[in-house]
């Protein structure tokens, strides 16, 4: 997703229309799969239409608008490292909602992960940090990750509460979230914040668009994985994203500094240590 979106934005498709294209077609694709697998009855919201719309908007509109706009100022590698903060953000969200503080070991791991993220974002150079376009992009990417953490948390709660399949929650929430995506894109166009892509930009980014639309199906397996493994263990797999993205970036000829690699390693180690610690607590219970 991230290398493809960076190339598409660089080719002339702005973040608003990139989100529009990805999830209008993506939601149709997921809904078609739901229709075939579970039938028409699975499209009933059972009185949860507002919750599905709200968290679908936060997850799909929030994640994608902020990601695709932010990545225009930053890089795919930075985006994936910031995404790797998801496990820590999930723990923080759970602690906030339950009214309890995380364990001191978790807080130390969070601090270590933050050090790694800062090294990646700044590349070891803190001069003019707040004034740099890259910092603005990275901040938007962090906000995008927070949106996805909120969506994952509440989507999992709805799956458990209503005994819905991961496919059903994905199709319903993404379809209702698309209504917000369409509205925001139209408003952005009217206010001249966004403009439809040219035919040349669409042709240049055709493979990127195929990747982005098809990866919308990954949300199904994501929700199913979280349901099967639990949030703590399941969300750890997000740490593979920066590894794969860095490999793709190197293959594409991007120069990745030792400081960025060091920061990435520190972040991933911190997240794995915290995951192992949380497993120990769970086993003791």
Image (cartoon, helix red, strand yellow):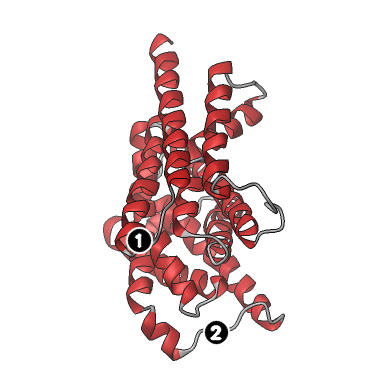
Q: Which mark is residue 82?
A: none
Judge the density around disc 1: few (<14), some (14-19), many (≥20) Cα neighbours within 10 Å. Answer: some
Q: Secondary structure at mark 1?
A: helix
Q: Quadrant of residue 235?
A: top left
Q: Residue at x 67, y 77 (%)?
A: 193
Query: Mark 2 or 1 closer to N-term?
Result: 2
Q: Is residue 54 left or right of residue 229?
A: right
Q: Looking at the picture, how far across and down is residue 55, in whole percent?
A: 57, 51
Where 10 falls versus 158 (above or below)?
Answer: below
* Residue at the bottom extreme, as displayed: 199
Dividing the image into 4 quarters, which one contains the N terminus?
Answer: bottom left
Residue annotated with mark 1: 215
Q: Nearer the viewer, residue 228 or 188?
A: 188
- Please report the residue visible at 63 percent of the width from the left and 55 percent of the height from the top: 135
In this view, 138 is above or below 87:
below
Residue 196: x %, y % from top left: 55, 84
- Asked which quadrant contains residue 70, the reply is bottom right
Q: Position of residue 93 (x, y in %)?
A: 60, 34
Q: Which residue is label 2 attached to?
A: 196
């Amino acid at each position: 997703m991230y290398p493809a979106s960076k190339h598409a934005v660089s080719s002339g498709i702005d973040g608003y229309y990139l989100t529009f294209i990805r999830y209008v077609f993506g939601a149709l694709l997921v809904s078609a799969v739901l229709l075939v697998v579970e039938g028409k009855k699975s499209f009933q919201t059972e009185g949860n239409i507002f919750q599905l719309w709200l968290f679908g908007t936060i997850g799909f509109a929030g994640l994608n608008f902020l990601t695709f706009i932010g990545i225009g100022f930053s890089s795919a590698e930075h985006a994936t490292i910031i995404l790797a903060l998801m496990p820590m953000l999930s723990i923080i969200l759970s602690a906030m909602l339950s009214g309890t503080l995380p364990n001191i070991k978790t807080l130390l791991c969070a601090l270590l992960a933050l050090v790694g993220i800062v090294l990646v974002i700044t590349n070891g150079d803190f001069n003019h940090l707040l004034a740099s376009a890259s910092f603005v992009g990275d901040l938007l990417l962090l906000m995008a990750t927070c949106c996805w953490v909120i969506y994952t948390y509440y989507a999992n709660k709805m799956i458990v509460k209503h005994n819905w399949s991961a496919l059903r929650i994905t199709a319903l929430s993404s379809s209702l979230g698309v209504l917000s995506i369409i509205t925001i894109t139209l408003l952005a166009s009217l206010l001249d914040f966004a403009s439809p892509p040219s035919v040349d930009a669409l042709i240049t980014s055709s493979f990127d668009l195929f990747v982005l639309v098809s990866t919308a199906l990954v949300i199904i397996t994501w929700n199913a994985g979280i349901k099967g493994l639990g949030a703590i263990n399941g969300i750890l797999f997000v740490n593979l994203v920066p590894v794969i993205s860095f490999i793709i970036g190197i293959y594409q000829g991007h120069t990745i500094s030792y400081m960025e690699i060091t920061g990435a390693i520190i972040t991933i180690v911190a997240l794995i240590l915290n995951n192992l610690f949380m497993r120990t607590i769970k086993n003791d219970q």
